[in-house]
Amino acid sequence: MDFLNKMQDQNPCSFYSLDMNEQGQLRNVFWADSKSRSSYNYFGDVVAMNAKPPHSIITNYCHDVAIAIKKVFPNAQHRFCLSHILNGLPEKLEEMENKDEIISTFTTLACGYVTIPDFDREWQDTIQHFHLEGNECLSKLYEVRMQWAPDLLFMLRTRFGQECLSQTEVIVYLTILMAG
């Protein structure tokens, strides 16, 4: 509470709201500073502000969350963060003998194909190559592939094979790309 009060004292445009249950216990905290409120007005965001629903929402992949978002924000574009999907593959494929090769192949596939037919063909070829036809996790991910939201920094690093690619280098690359 002290932090939120101090934040509001320092910046009158800051806002916070506390949600308590029937027993007076804290359930949820919402806070926004002036910068986040300004960004929301310009870009839209994942949080409804001023009775204005979000235009788009990006979350980790979770079926239950997807259902809730569709119910609460039926007009929002809901996407799943691709880097979180790919980072979760090691756990999902833990039992696989050649899991590192499978993960590498799927990462390249997810970040390297521009057209839907190429991606779909390569996905099926990869599933067959590694004998993953019965893998429920990968089947579910494929079903929601149109909802994957690429993390641009992650994709550029993966595509160019440069783990050291900085955010500044990405901005310079995008500036050149858009100018060209």
Image (spheres, rainbow, N blue to C red):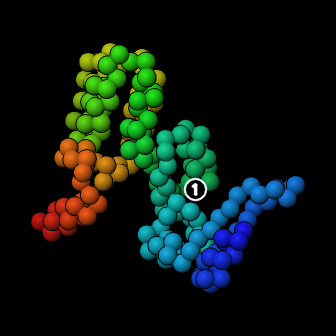
Q: Would residue 3 appear left or right of 139 to someone viewing this image? A: right
Which residue is under mark 1?
Answer: 73
State the image coordinates of residue 84 (x, y, percent, origin top left). 43, 43
In the displayed structure, 32 sits above or below 63; it is below
Crowding near pointer 1: few (<14 within 10 Å), some, many (20+)? some
Whether residue 147 is visible: no
Q: Give the quarter of the figure containing the N terminus.
A: bottom right
State the image coordinates of residue 118 (x, y, percent, origin top left). 22, 35
Q: Give the quarter of the figure containing the C terminus.
A: bottom left
In the displayed structure, 93 sits above or below 108; it is above
Quadrant of res 87: top left
Instruction: Write the residue at 71% across / 71% down.
Output: 2
Mark 1 residue type:
Phe
Q: How many marks?
A: 1
Quadrant of res 170: bottom left
Instruction: Write the residue at 53% across / 74% down.
Output: 37
State the image coordinates of residue 164 (x, y, percent, origin top left). 24, 51
Instruction: Write the residue at 44% across / 35% down.
Output: 88
Q: Secondary structure at mark 1?
A: loop
In front here: 88 or 117?
88
Find the residue positioned furthest to the left: 180
In front here: 123 or 105?
105
Q: Would residue 14 appear left or right of 160 to someone viewing this image? A: right
Q: Would residue 61 appear left or right of 146 to someone viewing this image? A: right
In the displayed structure, 8 sits above or below 21; it is below
Whether residue 34 is visible: yes
Quadrant of res 128: top left
In the displayed structure, 71 sits above or below 121; it is below
